[in-house]
Amino acid sequence: MKKYFLLFFAIGILFNSCNNDDNATPIEENKKKPEEIPVVKLATDYPVQNFMWKAMNSFYFWQGDVSDLADNRFASENDYIDYLSKNSNPEEFFYKICNNHAQIVGNAAATDRFSFVSEDYEDLVSRFAGIFKSNGLEFGLLRFSDSENVFGYVTYIIPNSNAATKDIKRGDLFTGVNGTTITTSNYRDLLFGTNDSYTLNMADINDNVISSNNKSVDLTKEENLQEDPILVKKVIEHNGLKIGYLMYNSFIANYDEQLNDVFGDFKAENIDDLILDFRYNGGGRVSSAIQIASSVYGTKTEDLFLKARYNDKIQASFNPGQGENNFIDKTLGGSQVNTLNLNRVYIITSGSTASSSELVINGLEPYIDVIQIGTNTVGKNEFSNTFVDDIENNYFYSPEREDKINPDNQWAIQPLLGRNENADGFSDYTSGLIPDYELFEDIANLGVLGETNEPLLELALNTISGTSSKIDFTPKYPAKLMGSSIEAKPMNNLMLMDGLLKPIASE
């Protein structure tokens, strides 16, 4: 840049000297037309790509494994600017600088399955608060044997949603959308596409055959649906024991106080045991996971809950103890955490249980007996953070600094930053956490959530009372999922560290 301005300044002096010399003869053919003057580009001329690269170079978990993120990748600033200029699509640019991202190499070959990008940070932040566009229908998807056709089953309906006003309930089946048969190749477009309204073509199971029943249900996605993650909470009396049951479907900080109140109620009821139902919980904020774990185990602030492991550059900048989070005695809102001080807990899981849900299980393991019931979890053991174009805050998103975010760049990235170890140093569960008692949901017998004869809850209750061996829980139609509506939910596969840690960016 300095060389360019010096050169430009010298050319200006030369032109002025020529113009002031009455005897000088202008040489027209040597004059450059204005459009021929070279335009010098800066990194700030590519604000989205520049912000993404700088944040990823500093904080991305696999920064050392990605050649394009190497500290010595560019010989000069001009090389760096040229690199930015050749990647005009921000979304493609982001996934290219991830480490073998699923968007590029496919899920089977992916190292990074979960980093993602958003064109609008405000929309992303709203979704993380549990506010999103939805019709309120939650469902699982299964493939017919020896066929590319797919059918869905309703897992639950979000209260106060569009679906809650329709004739549809848990356990109902559907095989088509708008008269089109659902298949492995079209289900995303039909169910997760841009159409806000669609019609489900419903079905029944008769004589081991799933077939259309000629019923249809019209559903419409509505803006700003806010789902309370506390779907079911109750105290169950079973074989002389008082057992608390909580179905909690997302770790959303906005509901931390209500969550704390649930444990206050359990404490007041003097429950003997606790069942946490995370089968539909895809994750969320780590701060909420620490809170619920503290409510189970105790407000023992001297005990380590997690130790965050970042990339080598970040780890090298840490002081001893930095990156660690202990159990807590206060919520983020300042309330005293209601705790049960249990020595065991029963947790229901499925193939949709991920991230912060898994973190609770892993973080409690060193301290109490965690009895896992259901099926393998996802195996999402990496955490992430939201980054925006706020260079003075090391690109970390902060709601108090929205006026500091570059107004010419609304993009946000949600890259994986590291893995959370428990107090025993364990974090290696990329294949999922394996249940102590395996049981799939049964398509033909889903039961009512929270009722004692719902198969997974019944198995948990009987495990507590020691009577599970006397009952055959084998499902007739096991729900071995190929997909679910949880894929489209804001907190899916998130272990969100926002607000907990702010490492200093490497220079």
Image (cartoon, grey):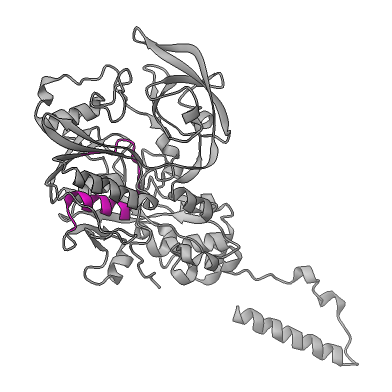
Residue name at image x 71 percent, y 86 percent: 10
Describe residue 384's horizontal placement relative to residue 468 as left or right. Answer: right
* Quarter of the image with the N terminus in it: bottom right
Q: Would residue 266 be seen by someone viewing this image from the given angle?
A: yes
Question: Residue reaching furthest left?
Answer: 466
Q: Is residue 274 left or right of residue 63?
A: left
Number of disc labels: 0
Q: Is residue 317 above or below residue 147?
A: below
| Farthest residue, direction front | 268
Q: Is residue 312 above or below residue 491?
A: below
Whole-percent x, y for residue 503 in the image: 35, 67
Say whether residue 495 is magenta. Answer: no
User: Magenta residues?
Assistant: 275-299
Report the residue at 9% width, 29% height from top. Answer: 466
- Quarter-of-image position of residue 69: bottom left
Q: Quadrant of residue 65?
A: bottom left
Instruction: Please name whichever residue, 339 or 501, is drawn nearer the observer in this view of the structure.
Output: 339
| Residue 250 image position (x, y, % from top left) | 36, 44
Is residue 289 shown in magenta? yes
Which quadrant, please, contains the C terminus?
A: bottom left
Q: Residue 86's spot in the image, x, y percent?
A: 58, 57
| Residue 381 in sight here | no
